[in-house]
Image (cartoon, rainbow, N blue to C red):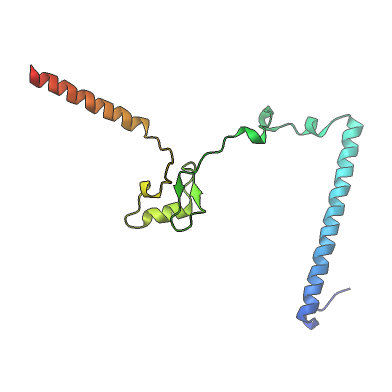
Amino acid sequence: MAVDLKTLSPKELQSLIANAEAQMHEAKSSQIHDVRKKIDTLLNNAGLSLADVYPTRGGRVAKKAGKRSVVAPKYRNPEDPSQTWTGRGKQPLWFVAALKKRGVTKESLLIEGAVTRKKAGSAKKATKKAAKKATRRRIKRR
């Protein structure tokens, strides 16, 4: 049943590939069906369920899909407005590339109305500086 591929035309090769892919898909589906039957039989004979054999990871119950909150995007790619980033996780490639351009800063890529928080450390520093200034003023007045 060996086929000499060198003698086939491009159309015949395409047809052969399509037939082989269809046959492969059928064989895989059949294999999956057979394995599922065997697993079901083993579980039924043992009186177990699939959840008994494969509990959730770490013994925790899986979270429901609707539990996570959606974070609003914070930054937008000026060249392609459909590309946004929330400011969480790894910086996207477009963000890194934009920052390398001259005159582009994080603030210039912010979406209007996006909520930004200052770092807690910088707020503490500002408070300390204000306290020092107030102390200096009191000392000068005396």
What is the quadrant of the C terminus in the image?
Answer: top left
Q: Is residue 12 left or right of residue 59?
A: right
* 70 vs 131: above or below: below
Q: Which residue is rendered at x = 66% and y = 30% of the image?
A: 58
Q: Residue at x 89, y 37 (%)?
A: 42
- Quadrant showing the N terminus: bottom right
Residue sitting at the far front? 113
- Total numbered circles: 0
Residue 17 vertical placement versus 92 (above, below): below
Res 128 quadrant in image: top left
Going by the image, does 60 lie left or right of 83? right
Q: Position of residue 46 (x, y in %)?
A: 89, 31
Q: Nearer the viewer, residue 23 or 73?
A: 73
Question: What residue appears at the point 86 percent right and 44 percent down from the top-left corner?
Answer: 36
Looking at the image, residue 4 sits to the left or right of residue 131; the answer is: right
In percent of width and height, residue 103 lies at 32, 55
Q: Is residue 109 above or below residue 15?
A: above
Quadrant hosting residue 136: top left
User: Among all residues in the image, which is located at the extreme top?
Assistant: 142
At which x and y percent is residue 14?
77, 74
Give the percent coordinates (x, y) of residue 92: 48, 50
